[in-house]
Amino acid sequence: MSESTRNLGKGLAASFLGFVFAVVMIEAIPRLLPGVMPKKLQAVQRLYDARNSWEGMMRGDRELGFVLQPGLDLRFPSEGREIGIRTSELSAAAARGIGFRDIGTSAPYQAIALGDSFTFCDDAPAETCWVRRLSEDLGISIATLGVNGYSNLAEARLLEKVLPSVGSKLVIVAFFPNDFKDNLHFHNWTKSGTDDYWTWMRRKRRSDTSDMLARNSVLYRLVDAARRYRKRDTFEYKEGGLDFLFRADAWWRYVLERPGDTPGYHLTIEAFEDMAATTRRSGARLVVLLFPFKEQVYWDIAREYYADLANMNDVDIDAPVDAVRTALHARGIDTCNLVEDLRAEARERRQLYLKVGAHWTDEGNRAAADAIAKCLHRLDAVDEHSSMGEVSARAAS
């Protein structure tokens, strides 16, 4: 073997060992010394850890796609803190084995709340969750049946399953604009012949090997995050007490182009029609809560960042929510639109949403509970003869 060949071999071996060492460091340091990592790397780790925790909280269900497991007692990673999550089992005979988050309210429940992660309050402690605050404001016991990632179609099926046994006379259901795409995904899953919605969704996005790496490898997470987010337009805003990362996500840009005229929109209205029929059969009252997204509430700030994007100059940011509200009113379904109430709070420079995440801060949960309480009283949705109690002075003001 020539000297040059030996030197080449040594160089390749050294490069390989250097690569292995770098990979080991990338994998080890975030686990051993998480606090020394750059903030963006910490954010990536938290997002993937949260996804892993969330999936571990669920089990597949052939009718609902997936359900929350009962009997959980864990810490869920959030921005800057961990959130305690406890779950109990629904007492309804038709819903055995289905869990719901324990926020400190107790049966009998005069009202139930359905929705996705906003209603689950997965970035808020139980005591600051808007459902808990609303329960205290109205003087009634409200159970939150919100589940991360649920669609309105799944919520309609869950309501039909549990309402006759729970016996609540008030049903509040939260709508968030990403429900358009979630309803379309759920509709397609029902035609797939599989028993686990989330496994079906995951395999549409990545292979089992990729999923295993996403669960366990820091390096893979960095590469995967860069691949997934490189096409997203993101903008940072930090001024006057507000600290936000705004994102021009495809899901809301798409529905802005065709408000009230997408497959997901039509499925959304269908789901609420089903819920209205279920509540009528049980003698209950249905109220749909219209939740805005972060960019929508802070549009006076965010729109400056999106002015140069295609089709964003003269956009009506409220059009998708307004389309749902109009359609539900035409069907005799009551709504509480939180857009203007939250904008009024936002004008006071209050941070209602997390910096990076899409969910409400503790202050946002407070503002939402106040707005919902006032709306329910305007609608006379709280039955004064059912021992629901008096609204608090804060909610009535």
Image (spheres, rainbow, N blue to C red):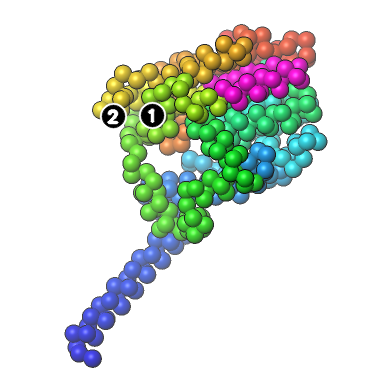
Nearest to the observer: residue 296 or residue 104: 296
Q: Nearer the viewer, residue 349 or 93?
A: 93
Q: Could you say whether the residue bearing mark 2 is in a helix, strand or loop? A: loop
Residue 94 in percent (x, y) is at 78, 36
Residue under circle 1?
253
Is 280 in the magenta? yes
Q: Residues within 10 Å of mark 2 (few under 14, many from 20)?
A: few
Q: Residue at x 34, y 36 (%)?
A: 234
The residues colored magenta run 269-290
Q: Quote the CA–CA distance across marks 1 and 2.
A: 10 Å
Q: Is residue 128 visible?
A: no
**Residue holding disc 2:** 309
Examine the residues drawn in magenta and state their main secondary structure. Answer: helix
Look at the picture and state if 281 lies above or below 120: above
User: Looking at the picture, does residue 38 appear above or below residue 14?
Assistant: above
Query: Does residue 312 show up?
Result: yes
* Type of amino acid at the residue the image marks with label 2: Leu
* Numbered disc total: 2
Q: Can you give x and y, in whole percent of width and height, for residue 95 in the image?
A: 75, 37
